[in-house]
Image (tube, rainbow, N blue to C red):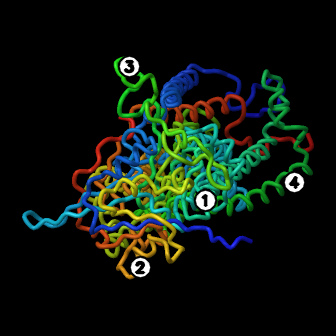
Amino acid sequence: MTAVATPKFGMVVDLERCQGCRACVEACKVENNTSQGVFWMHVFRLEEGEYPETQISFLPRPCQHCDNAPCVKVCPVGARYKRIDGLVLTDYERCIGCRYCVVACPYGVNYFNWKQPAQNYYMDWSDPDIQPASGGAVPPYRNPDLDGRYGSEQKRVAGGGHFRGIVEKCTFCVQRIEKGLQPACVTVCPVQALVFGDLEDQESPVSTYLRGKQSFRLLEETGTEPRVHYIGGRPPGTDVREIEPLQGRAGT
Amino acid sequence: MSVNVSGQPLPQGIGRVTPGWLAVVGAAAAALAVGLYAYSREASEGLIETGLGDPGTGRGVAWGLYVAFVVYFVGVSFAGITIAALIRLFRIERLQGIARIAELLTVVALLLAALSILVDLGQPLRGIVNLFLYARPQSPFFGTFTLVISGYLFASIVYLYLDGRHDAAICARVPSRLQWFHRLWAAGYRDTPAERERHRRTTVWLAIAIIPLLVVAHSTLGFVFGLQVGRPGWYSALQAPAFVVLAGVSGLGLLIVIAAFMRRVGVARERLDEAVFSLLGRFLMVLLIAYLYFMVAELLTSTYAGSHHEQLITQALLSGEYSTIFWASVGLLVLALGLMVWQAVTHRWSIAALVAAGLFVNVAAVGKRYLIVVPSQTQGQLLPYVPGSYAPTLGEYAVVVGLFGLGVLLFALFMKVFPIVELPEEEVPAGA
């Protein structure tokens, strides 16, 4: 028995700070090499009320890494699983592509690889005109950490764009966490609206940040027990509408 | 049709190819070829060939036409073996003529359902392997793979086999090119009174086992949807029983259509008489009433007391994006019920009217299955995503057409190698 407790990772999102710049969305795409139309991190830009009395708000939506995750429950082969440190991950060597997790998730955070990921980046890297600039790399940026095996299970779970016909989603940047780094979205946020860390440890920065503040979690009524807490705002009501939605179906 | 007199041909046109049969087989094979081509595109390019997409920011649906047809085909399989088992359990002699068609319908429909799942998977090969290696009972899918596709299919094949041995033994007495096949099926069965009694007892027990299996299996398919708390429109306790009942409606409807077709092409006309059809019709009528009751109860709950998101879906069904399919399906169901009630009241059962009703309920069942699968994904987002949309591509339709082609092909081949209507018992000399 070791005295060291397993960390229980979680995230706090300060809605008062978020300005909807979507830098986190971009950082996530670069770090995790996700293909076109795939947004593991998404920031809702929401509008409420009628002109001229409209109110605007922003709502970052990473995977909620639920403790009672519907996607984990429904996966027929156990490819989607919950780690002891709170992360919900996909073993992309086991996923059969039935997309049950996609329809079971109330947050809409799952993305299926509808076509060969290599053919599905924003630019055609094999284009001869691009080749001189990219030095022949396909794609030019490829984080070697994304191919590693992680956790005691030693599964391939990090990053996106690996196989056609499987489901991928936000991993809280497992490849960075295992190195002691913060997820890419947290690191890049210019106003530090995202705080990440061990929610179990009462002295961790994330717990201190959350303490004493009024917080909520998304769709708590569905009983999913998410590990992402929101402060400085209120849950989106039924009369908000998304403006400036992200464009594009994956692969078109 | 005394089949055991030597020199007589095999009953029901077995082994004799007619131009009409060739035309049906040709059309079915062509449909299958189209489906195979469409699937080959999907296999090489990925599911990008379909109209599916990611719900949420992708504004698509992850489950579409294929899943709707998985549910439809499993539903159709319901009626088959149930009818056969009920005939056996309650000794409804009048329906005996339809038992084999019903059994075959179950086997074929379940095969088509399994194939529909396979074409929907992103990694079909892994799907087959990993389900054996890592299947989890906690997933509602577990029941679909174990109870529906494996258990139910296996039980149905065994039932079809056992029930067919008697006829196989009779056919095996006739010298023909198919004699080896009939001998193989009969497997030493000679139809002695002792054998007959043993068979009767076995099939009765199998029938007793099949009926609860059927209810459980079809319920698990309903639970695939009904247990999803994050999907308004799916999350409902009524989902499982309503699945079972609509399954019965579509299955019985299709059974009537197929039996009428067999009668039309002259297979054992005297065994498929009006009495058979009127009995099936009454059964269909009762199930139809039960289904409409479920539907009204569900609609009433979701309009009167539904959450905001459930009301959005109900609105999309009643007057929005999906209203055409919804009202067309409901209209066809009501029309079919009207036809049944009118026939029941006048005591005049017409096969043509029953076939029409059978077709109506099947088109309606496809529509209803589609409406279960799709709207909860486009309008049922709990977070404020822009509503999604879905239109199946030509490729998806082609694959479904190919599946139907395969089904027709299997039926057509079966009826040329084996009696598709059970041979009457009294024609068998005792102790042959």
In front: mark 1 or mark 4? Answer: 1
Q: Chain of mark 1?
A: B
CA distance separating discs 1 and 4:
42 Å
Which class describes the residues within 10 Å of circle 4: few (<14), some (14-19), or many (20+)?
few
In this figure, which residue is indicated by the disc labeled 1? Answer: B139
B150 sits to left or right of B300: right
Q: Chain of mark 3?
A: A
CA distance separating discs 3 and 1:
49 Å
- Amino acid on which the number 3 mark rests in the picture: Pro
In the rendering, at what x and y percent does residue B369 appear?
A: 45, 52
Cβ–Cβ below 8 Å for labels 3 and 2?
no
CA distance separating discs 1 and 2:
36 Å
Q: State whether residue A66 is above or below residue A76.
A: below
In this figure, which residue is indicated by the disc labeled 4? Answer: B197
Q: Are marks 1 and 2 on the same chain?
A: no
In front: mark 2 or mark 4? Answer: 2
In this figure, which residue is indicated by the disc labeled 2? Answer: A211
CA distance separating discs 4 and 3:
83 Å
In the rendering, at what x and y percent does residue A122 appear?
A: 35, 34
Query: Which disc, if any, is residue B69?
Result: none
